[in-house]
Each structure stands twice: as C-alpha cells, then as structure tokens.
Image (cartoon, rainbow, N blue to C red):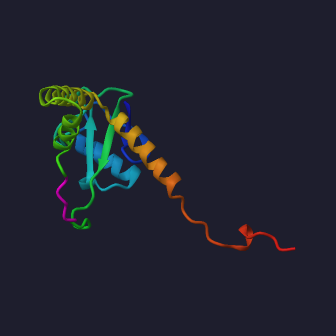
Amino acid sequence: MLISVKILKGGECDIEVSATASINSVKQIVAEQLRIPVDQQKLVFKGKTLLDSETLCDYNIEEGNKIHLFVQEDEQQTESVPEEPIPDFYEQLQKFLQKHFSPADALKVLEEFRKNLADQLRHLSLDDIERIATVHLDSDRKKHPPQQSFTEENTPMQS
C-alpha cells in the first residue's frame, strides 16, 4: 500500500509498504529516502506517536493515509540555553481585566477565556500548526529579507 510521510518543516514523500510492516521498518525506508537517521525520527498518526515495535495495521493506517514525521535534533549537537522566567500569561491577563471589570467579572471572563482557548487548542491538527508556522516564517522572511551582495549586475549604470 502507498502512504505519505509528511515532514513538519519540509517536504513529503510517498512510500510503498505492507499493512503488516513494523513502524521500525517504515523508519528504515524513510531514512533511505529522506536521509534522516532512524534515531532522529518520530512518526505520528492522528496525534499518536507510533511505537517501533507496532505495525501499521495496529494503528489502522490504510492506503493513502498521511503520517507526520518530526525530526528530533541530535541531543549531543544542541546546546542548552538557560530559560528566563516568563510571566504567567493568565496573571497578566487577569491584571488587565481587573482594570476594566469588577474582580468578579474579570474572573468570569478569564475562566471563559481559558475554556475557549483550551477547546481551540484541543482541535488543532498538525496541518493547522504547520500552516501557522509557515505563515509566521514567511512574514519573518518578508520583514528581514536576505541582503543582496553588491555586484556589477545590480549596480546602477553610470553615464
């Protein structure tokens, strides 16, 4: 059967596998086609991380389905950056709301906001996250385009 493997920050490839193929064998095929080491692959289908010891049919993966591939950085290559404490978003929001509402009303609005946000996050798909990331990355590129080198081809002609 033919299934698609979609890299979160990249391309997509189709692979031919049997329904009884193990997830580990799928990772081997992906490693050959996309040159991504097996130990850096994390395969996800419908929000579930696929275990190497299981098979495609264990996850009800069928012809034409799409599996998402997350590429995990090699832990030895990444440097740990100390994180600065981030002010609690909900504390900040509550302070803001209390400037405009009574304390009881501010608390009601805050709780409703929390419920709505949690519900929206629960319904985000990996495709939604990729779309959001793409829009954000594209807008960053427009704000900070790569600088052109100054060559004879792009210099104004002198007369």
> Which of 72 and 41 lies nearest the eye of the viewer?
72
Does the stretch in magenta take in 72?
A: no
The residue that appears at 34% across and 54% down in the rendered structure is: 36
The residue that appears at 83% across and 74% down in the rendered structure is: 158
The residue that appears at 22% across and 65% down in the rendered structure is: 81
Q: Position of residue 98 (x, y in %)?
A: 18, 35
Give the side of residue 103 with respect to residue 97, left or right: left
Relative to 133, say whether 147 is above or below.
Answer: below
| Identity of the residue furthest to the left in this view | 104
Q: Quadrant of the rendered structure where residue 135 is?
A: top left
Q: Quadrant of the rendered structure where residue 35 is?
A: bottom left
Q: Position of residue 109 (x, y in %)?
A: 20, 27
Q: Which residues are magenta?
A: 81-86
The quadrant of the rendering that contains the N terminus is top left
Give the side of residue 139 with respect to residue 93, left or right: right
The quadrant of the rendering that contains the C terminus is bottom right
Q: Position of residue 12 (x, y in %)?
A: 43, 42
Relative to 124, say whether 39 is above or below.
Answer: below
> Which of 122 and 56 lies nearest the eye of the viewer?
122
- Main structural element of the magenta stretch: helix, strand or loop? loop
> Which of 81 and 158 lies nearest the eye of the viewer?
158
Does the stretch in magenta take in 83?
A: yes
The residue that appears at 19% across and 60% down in the rendered structure is: 84
Give the side of residue 148 with respect to residue 31, left or right: right
> Which of 13 and 47 lies nearest the eye of the viewer?
47
Q: Position of residue 5 (x, y in %)?
A: 37, 40
In this rendering, the count of numbered labels is: 0
